[in-house]
Image (cartoon, rainbow, N blue to C red):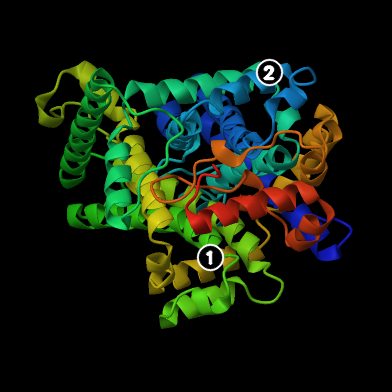
Amino acid sequence: MNFSNPVNAFKGAYSMILLIFSIVIIMGLIATSQTNLSADVHPALAYVLIWVAIGWLTMVEGGQASLVGLAPVNAELYRDSHPIAYKCTKITNKGDNLDRYLLGRQFMVVIMVFTVNMSGGPLGDAELWGFPSWLSGIFLQSGLAMILFTCNVGQLNTQVNASLCMLDYIDTYFGLFTLWVSMAIEFSGLLHSSYLVQMLVAALAGKKIESNEDPRTFGGNIFFFGRCIISLAILIGCFAVTLEALFNDQTTMWEGVPAWAAVLVFFILMSVVGMLEGMQIAFFAVAKLPISERGDSVWAKKTTELLFRGEGNNLPGFMIGRQLCVVSCMFFVARVTSVDIAPGEENIFGVPDGLQELFNTGLLGALITTICASISWQLVASAFPYAFLSNPITYVLLRLCLVLESTGLCGAAWVIAAIHKKFAGFQRDEVYIGTGEERAKGDMGDDTAHVPVGPGHMAKLPGFADNAPKSLKKLLKKDANVAQYITSQIDQMETGSSGKA
């Protein structure tokens, strides 16, 4: 963001003021035991968990931008200058590991957001320092303070730096550890029911799922599908427990909301998150197509006309607003699905206390959200982008995201990113490995085969697309490396190819 522009400078300044105020409020709520974790356990634990979760979230979000962005680059070019980054990409560039990493890190994002909500989310009747009711309603009851904190500190600022300084950002043992955790989550099989969705989507699209690995052996198939069945059973169990708690008014849902309304809100929020996750895939899938090929329906034409109007600034604007919407919905889903058993009440389905404590952590809601409200919708959008474009809800959500972006609420992310970059000494990747054009001219071995795209894959552009400033077009012209990467990814999305010869 160019802060020499008075409008941008104003947005950055007022956004920082709101962010600082929000952080002070959240810390005050924890100190006065007015959040779920501080009230149930101890404020000290809530303080530790909220900052650990938000700090880890920065690496989960930034790591994705780095690892996906570096996938086409010959790792030998930075083997000596960035040895830890080299270790990371040697893992993700092997076989289908990038797909596995993306699956695991998606669950980590949801877990971190749910943890932040448990640690700092205000109780329903929270009051602080004699704030007037209207101020408490805006920052506490609506969740605005938590949303600004999570988006600006935990997500957007880290993506800004990681998208252009990928090597420096991922060249830490923290990044390598986060990668291992993501891979371990995928290997556990907890999310393997997503692969069943992947297979179904590819079959409906009439296309084969591209893979960089040899076909599985008989034993490999038993191990793989065994985890798929177990994952599906766990997912069904999560739904059963969550719905039972909702119907029995045993969640942290606001008091006075009837059971049927709570269930309805749950599925509506899940659908909204899913639509927002799928829309980003669909929009980039048609970004380079001629206007005549972006869909024939009235709503597809209205959506694409709005999205690509003028210089195309509405596309990055949507991605910023989308981040705010997704985080907002996730906080509400966390509140709706978090089980809360009052003292003396019988455990859900009469389970032992130990298992009930697991239900109370919010893990069940996080698993449902990851698979059913995130991964599945991304996979569907990768195969059927035109179906998303032709949906009137897509147009409505696009309008909403653009309105949210125009408020400048995320301006603080750019300020934090600039400060972080200064103190960390980050440099742009071309300083170490040259631009995409220079590497191509020198035949340095760039290869896009490691980037999983097309039907059946959670194809996503680098993280900076989630928070790019309105000067995106100028950035593409100035930075050939960024322009080449975006071009290659959109080309692959359109063709459904993996980049292999």
Q: Residue pushed farthest bottom? A: 298
Between 205 and 365, the residue placed more toward the observer is 205
Q: Amino acid at mark 2?
A: Ile
Between 331 and 236, the residue placed more toward the observer is 236
Q: Which residue is mark 1?
A: 286
**Quarter of the rendering containing residue 318:** bottom right
Disc 1, SS: loop
Q: Quadrant of the N terminus?
A: bottom right
Between 385 and 64, the residue placed more toward the observer is 385
Q: Quadrant of the C terminus?
A: top right
Q: Amino acid at mark 1?
A: Val
Which mark identifies residue 425? Answer: none
Q: Counting other residues with Cα less than 10 Å from the Cα at mark 2, is it few (<14), some (14-19), or many (20 or more)?
A: many
- The percent coordinates of residue 38 (x first, y second) are 45, 27
Residue 147 visible in the current orientation: yes
- The percent coordinates of residue 438 (x first, y second) are 83, 42
First in residue order: circle 1 vs circle 2: 2
On screen, residue 143 above or below 236: below
Q: Residue pushed farthest front? A: 501
Which residue is at 40% across, 70% downward? 393
**Quarter of the rendering containing residue 390:** bottom left
For the residues labelled 1 and 2, the Cα–Cα distance comes to 36 Å
Q: Residue pushed farthest left? A: 350
- The percent coordinates of residue 316 (x first, y second) are 64, 60
On screen, residue 284 above or below 297: above
Which residue is at 56% across, 18% downward? 177
- The percent coordinates of residue 280 (x first, y second) are 51, 57
Q: Counting other residues with Cα less than 10 Å from the Cα at mark 1, is it few (<14), some (14-19), or many (20 or more)?
A: many
On screen, residue 46 above or below 232: above
Q: Which residue is mark 2?
A: 84
Residue 112 visible in the current orientation: no
